[in-house]
Structure formats: structure tokens, C-alpha cells
Amino acid sequence: MQALLQSEKEETNGSAGSWNKEFFEGFPEMFFTATGDWRLIDVNEAGVRMFRYASQNEMCRIGSLASLFRDAEEWRLFRKRVETQGSVRGVLVGLRRRDGSRFPAGISANISAEPAETFTCHGIIRDMSENLELQRTFKENEQCVRDLKRTLMMLSHDVRGPLVALEAALELTIRGRFGSMEESVCNKLKSLLKYTLRLSGIVEDHLAEAAVIDGCGEVQKEVLDLRQDIIDPVLEELAEEILSRGITIEKSADTIHSGAVTIHAARRWFRSLYRNLVRNAIQYGGKECTIFFGYEDQGRHYRLNVYNSGKPIPEEFRDKLFTKFSRIGDITESSAAGTGLGLYLVREIIRNHGGEIWYEAAQTGSNFVFTIPKENERQT
């Protein structure tokens, strides 16, 4: 009976060993086994290729695993760490191939204690050359993005000043401040003012998107009439697009009108906020949709919303609406290109003003709802 059990045990171990060997050989990274004195006794084909030996036998004849390290002190520290801790994961070291070429590698190793107070070490070695190169490239690209952002912000600031001056000069000229003019000339100036306002809005959005990559930064607030100082200028910028699509801006008793909502906010940031929400409504509401600007005075804060009729945003996109670089799926006939920062920027602006934003789907359209604390309540 005992002989039979021993036979079954040997067959089972043999089967398991065969499976492990097959997995060991087929693994894309280097598997190795070393003795208690760190003599290399087994290695898979991936290891042979990694270190450019002719065969497994040839590689195992190198003796100690230390022969694979390019620096003796690094080997000493690695060995001490493994023997002290019993296992390590992803230790970055410098290794040396048979032909003398060097490469960075990550080693994970585990010691299996034996009855005779010796041990066997099993481990994995991964060539990290490509990973480290990708990390280096990523860091360089990050620096390029930061440099580009700074350049963009500098250019936008430089452009914005002259645009504001041009807007003011055009408005004064149209009002007749510098003398009367023919109606055709006045109409041309009005058209020029329209494009100037739109360009100014684009510059503001670029400034906001550049800043939001690293956070909105300091918010400089002033007392604003939400309708007169924010919503109406944005609608004026986008008037041509609104008219061409046959979109209706709904006005009723509970919509925002001049004097209804006074906020303490950053003018440029809030214009960018509403500009993005209106563009979103134009794009996803579609032709002949209705856009509505609502509000509720809830005592300690305002509850504001921008609603558009049309198809609601598909459920699978709603969790990603306010994430950086996300895009809503193409649910309209024509989907405008964008950076994927619009709604993320909106959320960051609102949070920097102490509020929150969320999306509510309706059978007849989409509703973006957000809160803004009243400044006098926040200070008490």
C-alpha cells in the first residue's frame, strides 16, 4: 500500500513538474533558478536570448548569478536584500550580456527554504530598456506640454489685450463717437465687431484650457450680473451659429434675466464656463433645439442650469462627462472637433468657485445643473 501511494505521488509530482516546465519555457521573460550559493542551475529560453548565449547549458556554466551584474557593489546589495527579506519584486539593476553590452533590468526573486538549512532562489528578470525609454519620452513630452502651455498662455495674453482695445474702439465708432458714417460702413463695422468678439472668446477658452491642465490657479473675483455680464456676451459671440441652426433661446419667468442673479466670480472663467455649456447644447441639441438658462435661489447658494432639448446623452458616456480629454460619442449628424477639455474645464471652474456640477437626463433633452455659493454666506 505504501509503495502504491509513493508511486502515485511520484506520478503526480512528475505531471506537475512537466506543466511547470512547459510554462517556464514558454514565458516571454527570463525565469531562473539558483542554489543557496547563487549558482545558476536553470534558465529558460527567454533568458538565453536575453543574455545572448548559445544554449541553456552554456548559460548555466557561468557559475554565480553575480556574473550577470555589471557592478559588483550592486550585486552585493541585491543579494543582501533578497537573503534578508526572503523575496523582492521589481528591483531595478544594471546587467551585462555575454557580448559585454549592458541594459537595465527589473528582478523579482523568491527564496524557498530547504530542510538542510540551504535555499533555492527562483526569479524573473525583465529587460527594462524599452520601458525606461518610454518613461524618458513621456517625461520629455510632459515638459513639451508644459512649455507649450506657457507659450500658449503668453501668446493668448498678448493677443487678448489688443482684442479688448479693438472691441472698445469698434463699439465707440459704431455708436458715432468719432462722427457719423454711412449705413453700409456701420454694418461692416458691426460684422467686424462680431468676429472680434468671437476671436476674443476663442482666446479666453485657450487661456482657460491651458491653465486647467495644471489647475485653474488663483481665481480673481468681482461682483457680476450673471445675465448681463456673462450669458448675454456669450450668446452675442455665438449668435451666428445659433441663428444658422435655428436654435431658440427660451425666455420665461423662471429664466435668468438681468438683475436676477448677482454672483461674486471671475468674469473670464465664468464666460468660459457658459461658453462651453452653450456650445455643448448647440452641438448635442441639434438644429432647431431650445436652450434654457434656469436658476433657483436656495438661500445659501444658487442652483443654476443650462438645458437643451433634443436627445439626452447616452448613458454609457455619462460617467465620463467631466473627465479630462473625454469625448461624448457622435450622437448628432455633425460632431464638432474639440480637445475633450470643455466639460472638465467647466467642472474645475465651478469647484474653484465652491460649487458642484452634475448631469440630469430628461426625456426631452439634457440638463447640466450646478451650484454656486453666495459669497456673503461663504464668509459668515
Image (cartoon, rainbow, N blue to C red):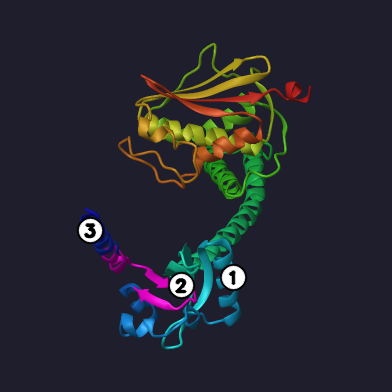
Residue 53 seen: no
Q: Nearer the viewer, residue 176 or 247?
A: 247
Report the residue marked by disc 3: 3
Mark 2 crowd level (few <14, some 14–19, many ≥20, 10 Å Cα): some
Furthest-bottom residue in this view: 99
Q: CA distance from mark 3 to mark 2?
A: 53 Å
Q: Quadrant of residue 379?
A: top right
Mark 3 vs mark 2, foreground winner is 3
**Residue 129, label in figure:** 2
The correct choice, above or below, for 195 with respect to 39 in the image is above
The quadrant of the rendering that contains the C terminus is top right
Of callouts 1 and 3, which one flags the residue occurring earlier in the amino acid sequence? 3
Q: Amino acid at mark 1?
A: Lys
Asked whether the beta carbons under mark 1 and mark 3 sit within 8 Å of each other, the answer is: no
Element at badge 2?
helix
Furthest-top residue in this view: 253
